[in-house]
Image: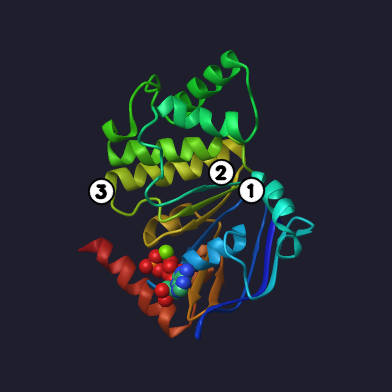
Amino acid sequence: MILKIENLYKAFGNKNVLTGVNIEIPEKSICSVVGQSGTGKSVLLKCIMGMIPADSGAVWFKDVELTRLNRKELIEIRKHFGYAFQNAALFDSMTVGENLEFPLREVLQVKNRAIIKKKVAEILDWIELPGIEHMHPSDLSGGMRKRVGVARALMLQPEVLFFDEPTTGLDPVLSETIMNLVLRVNKELGVTCILITHDIPAAFRISDQIAFLHQGTIVADGKPEEVARSDHDIVRAFLRISFNELQV
Ligand SMILES: Nc1ncnc2c1ncn2[C@@H]1O[C@H](COP(=O)(O)OP(=O)(O)OP(=O)(O)O)[C@@H](O)[C@H]1O
Ligand SMILES: [Mg+2]
C-alpha cells in the first residue's frame, strides 16, 4: 500500500466532519473518493496531505506515519505528493512557461536554464499543448488551464497526485479530456492518483477503487463493480441518480 488511512477523525468546533475514516490505497492505482456535497471529501484530502492536522488517527505513506511528523519532516515528504485543485491556481502574472518552471526552480533548486526549458517543453508536449510557453493563464480556455495545472503538479514527478474536482465547471467533452489525462498520468507515468469527483460515471470508468464517504465514514469501498453492488441505502440512491442522469 502506498497510502493507508486509519481511523481518521476531524472536527471543526462541535462539527464532526470525519468520524473514523479507513482507506488503503495500493501503489500505482486510481482511487476516487465520492459522496454528497459537504460530507468531508476535501477535508479528508487535506488531512491526508497534511495541509490540515487530523484530530486523531493515522495516515501512512509507505512505512512513514505522516501524522507523527513535525512540520519540517512533513514538508520534505510532501515533495512526493502533487495536487491539482479545482481552479488550477496558476499564477496569472506569469506565463505558462514560468508557471511550469516555478516548482523546478523553487522546490528542486534546478538552475540550468537549458534543462528547465527542455523539461517545460516536454511536459507541454505530453499534455498535448506544445509551444504555449509564452501564453498567459488568462488567455487559456478552462480546459487548457486545468491541463497546465496538472502539468505543473507533474513537474516534481510526484508519486501520488491528488485531484479535487478536476472537472467541475467543464463541459462534458473537456471533462472527458481531463479524466483521460488522469488515466494517462496513472498508466503512462505510474503515478498513484487520488481523485475527488462528482462525475460518477467517469469515476467508475477510470478508477481501480471507489471510496464512498458518508457522514464522516467510508460506507462503501472497493472496485467500481463492488461498490455498484453495495446494499447501503445512500450509496444505492446516489449511484442510481448519478447514472440515470446520464441517460436523460
Ligand atoms: N476550515 C474549516 N473550518 C470550519 N469548517 C470547515 C472547514 N473546512 C471544511 N469545513 C466544513 O467541513 C464540512 C465538509 O467540507 P468539505 O469541503 O470537505 O465537503 P466536500 O465533501 O468536499 O463537499 P463538496 O462536494 O461540496 O466539495 C463542511 O460542513 C464544511 O463547512
Ligand atoms: Mg470538496
Q: Of marks 3 and 2, which one's residue comes earlier in the chain?
A: 3
Quadrant for residue 173, please give it.
top left
Residue lying farthest left?
248
Amino acid type shown at disc 2: Asn
Q: What secondary structure is found at the residue carrying circle 2? A: helix
Q: Does the CB distance between marks 2 and 1 fall below 8 Å?
A: yes
Name the residue rendered at 52%, 18% in the picture. Answer: 117
Q: Nearer the viewer, residue 23 or 120?
A: 120
State how many labels appear.
Answer: 3
Compared with residue 12, is residue 182 higher up or lower down, i.e. above or below? above
Instruction: Name the residue beneath numbered marker 1.
Output: 28
189 displayed left or right of 59: left
> As shown in the figure, which amino acid type bears the numbered disc 3?
Asp
Q: In which quadrant of this rendering is ligand 1 seen?
A: bottom left
Q: CA distance from mark 2 to mark 1?
A: 7 Å
Q: Give me the disc on residue 171.
A: 3
As measured in the structure, the alpha-carbon distance from the residue carrying label 3 to the one carrying label 1 is 28 Å
Q: Residue at x 66, y 45 (%)?
A: 80
Colour theme:
rainbow
Q: Neighbour class for label 1 at 10 Å: few (<14), some, many (≥20)?
A: some
Is 192 placed above or below 36 here? above
Judged from the image, the secondary structure of the residue bearing numbered disc 3 is loop
Quarter-of-image position of residue 222? bottom right
Closest to the observer: 88 or 233?
88
Describe residue 234's horizontal placement relative to residue 190 as left or right. Answer: left
Residue picked out by circle 2:
186
Residue 245 versus residue 168 in the image, above or below: below
Whether ligand 2 has any atom under 8 Å from the Cβ at mark 1 is answered as: no
Q: Position of residue 158 (x, y in %)?
A: 62, 42
The one nearer the camera, 24 or 239, is 24
- Which quadrant of the figure contains the C terminus? bottom left
